[in-house]
Image: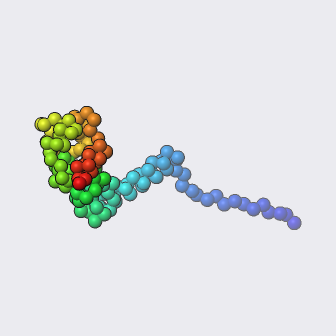
Amino acid sequence: MTTQTPTLRSRRSLHVSGLAYAALVLVLFFGTIQVAQYAGLWSVSGKLTPDGAPIQLSGADPAEIKGWMTIQQVLDAYPVEQAALYERFGIPADVATSTPLKELEAVAEGFSVTELRTWVAEQGAP
């Protein structure tokens, strides 16, 4: 009686290099994010509500003030005067009210959105 040794069948498998596999994973990951952003299902800017409507300042809470907002949006929502704001933070008079707050840090020494929030809260206090 002879014993047979089991034979292994050769299975065909797809060999993918590590570099190609890593590239595929990254493309799938970032591609999914891009598709979701283009479809309007993913927003990271903070400029839109979950419904897709632009965020409007309520004027009730200065913590709502964000760096991407303009000077005019702050003036419209809170009880502050443009002259007082410009004077308090040393903003040059030729800076337009359409300027985003984050750009003021480069032109007005000592300006920060955090300081603006504090100042606006003090202005609204009775």
Q: How many marks?
A: 0
Query: x, y (%) of residue 119?
Result: 26, 46
Is residue 69 shown to the viewer in this render? Answer: no
Query: x, y (%) of residue 82?
Result: 14, 45
Is residue 123 shown to the viewer in this render? Answer: yes
| Residue visible at 32% across and 57% down in the picture | 43
Residue found at the very far right of the displayed protein:
1
Write down the quadrant of residue 47 in the picture.
bottom left
Quarter of the image where the N terminus is located: bottom right
Q: Nearer the viewer, residue 54 or 61?
A: 61
Query: x, y (%) of residue 85?
Result: 19, 43
Q: Is residue 13 above or below residue 86?
A: below
The colour scheme is rainbow
Q: Is residue 87 above or below residue 41?
A: above
Quarter of the image where the C terminus is located: bottom left
Is 8 placed left or right of 20 in the picture? right
| Residue visible at 54% across and 55% down in the picture | 14
Write down the quadrant of residue 101 in the picture.
top left
| Residue visible at 64% across and 58% down in the picture | 10
Is 94 placed left or right of 122 in the picture? left
Q: Nearer the viewer, residue 48 or 67?
A: 67
Q: Nearer the viewer, residue 81 or 26?
A: 81
Q: Nearer the viewer, residue 36 or 112?
A: 112
Residue found at the very far left of the displayed protein:
94
Query: x, y (%) of residue 113?
Result: 28, 44
| Residue visible at 44% across and 50% down in the picture | 26
Q: Is residue 57 above or below residue 22?
A: below
